[in-house]
Amino acid sequence: MNYAETLEYLQELYGMLGYDLGLDRIYALMDSMSKPQDSLKVVHVAGTNGKGSICSMVSSVLMTAGYKVGVYTSPHLEKYNERITINNKQISDEDFAKYLTDVKEHCEMIVKNGIGQPTIFEVVTAAAFKYFYDHKVDYVVLEVGMGGRCDATNIVKKPECSIIASISLDHMEYLGDTLGKIAYEKGGIIKSGCPTVLLTDNEEIYSVIEDICNEKGSKLYLAKTTGAKIIKQDISGTVFDVENEVVSFKNVKIGLLGEYQIVNATEVLMAFKAMKDNGMDISDETIKEGLAKAKWNGRMEIVENSPMVILDGAHNIDGISMLFKSLKKYFSDKKITMLIGILGDKEYEKMLELIMPIAHKAVFTEPHSNRKWDVNEVAHLVEKYNTEIYIEKDIDKAYGLAKSITDKDDVVVCAGSLYLIGELYKLARKSEGSAI
């Protein structure tokens, strides 16, 4: 297959299979490919929100230490290649096609053996494992797709560390309708003899993860608060001290914006403490330098100036809540125009209740997804807010509209769906006021 044919193949798989959790297919597929994942050193990251940011921070620290680092994340913003990187360089179109062609051939063999067709996520995951193996990376930073216990990434046997990021209610039709049930699914990545990192003040989540760690024989590195003291915080970044049950650091700097990034950075500091305890040779100064360099597209990212345009991948209640807190922190003196596009299977009424009070104006649009909401159904939900409302289904036009109704000294904030953010990222790059 060439690159275009590869994308057609993946689209066929998406339409045919969708989500189908379980490990039988991916085990059979990787066995057919001689188990490249078993030779990789992996840092495994699960959670509802913050996984991508944590992966970015961990990989930045490892690269700063001189390691060759593969990163596997999902979803992508603009193209599939973003999901598979080595030292921040995306897999080429040619290699993407080459590895997917190889995986497809193995899929055809296991289908003949009666195992079943691997899903789109399993296929791309298999390609990533083989690509990292062939390119002899020192570490793989591996983001769970959804859940953990039955996720295709969960075939790694002995990760260097398992990190459980923020847990909240999302994908409840697959993972359960309580925090405890969802924590159980996320905790499925915990492995015997491998350290686990968790930062939470929720007793239900803590209890579930602790029980799994005790059962598996995994040392739990737990903090119930960040223990952070903010020294400086503005749109140029954050400087803070941190001291909790696990780590103590002074003058930690992160460039990633958002109140929640302090939590993510603290978990990364805890993860390196756990790995150092297990023999990793890395200095605290290297860890701090790597955190300061970390970048993550589409998460509280400034992409245009005059007016300032911010893209944030908040796409569930917890994410929208964290976005609200960040906007109050950074832009309390600005008028905010929200550009919102949410998938119809999300709890969008509650998401709107959280974010609308901060919006002076709002433009509603439709993400490019068959799960999109119908913006025409939104009007009656927002009548109670003292906000100017605009509806524009076309994303390109909606983006232009949001900027045109916003004064140059104020802010446009785009959120609600990663499908939306991916489309807006393309538009922002083409704009005269682009900051990317």
Image: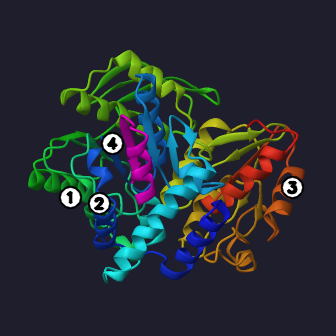
Mark 1 touches mark 2? (CB < 8 Å)? yes
Circle on res. 183: 2
**SS type, badge 3:** helix
Nearer-the-camera pick, 321 or 281: 281
Give the mark, 4 or 2, whose residue is nearer the N terminus.
4
Circle on res. 43: 4
Q: Is residue 92 left or right of residue 239?
A: right
Mark 3 touches mark 2? (CB < 8 Å)? no
Question: Residue at coordinates 36% horizontally, 34% vertically from top-left?
Answer: 138
Give the mark, 4 or 1, whose residue is nearer the N terminus.
4
Percent position (x, y) of residue 325? 55, 45
Give the mark, 1 or 3, whose residue is nearer the N terminus.
1
Give the residue pinned by disc 1. Answer: 208
Asked whether 138 falls inside the magenta stretch, the response is yes
Give the residue pinned by disc 3. Answer: 400
Q: Which residues are magenta?
A: 126-143
Q: Nearer the viewer, mark 4 or mark 2?
A: 4
Q: Amino acid at mark 4?
A: Val
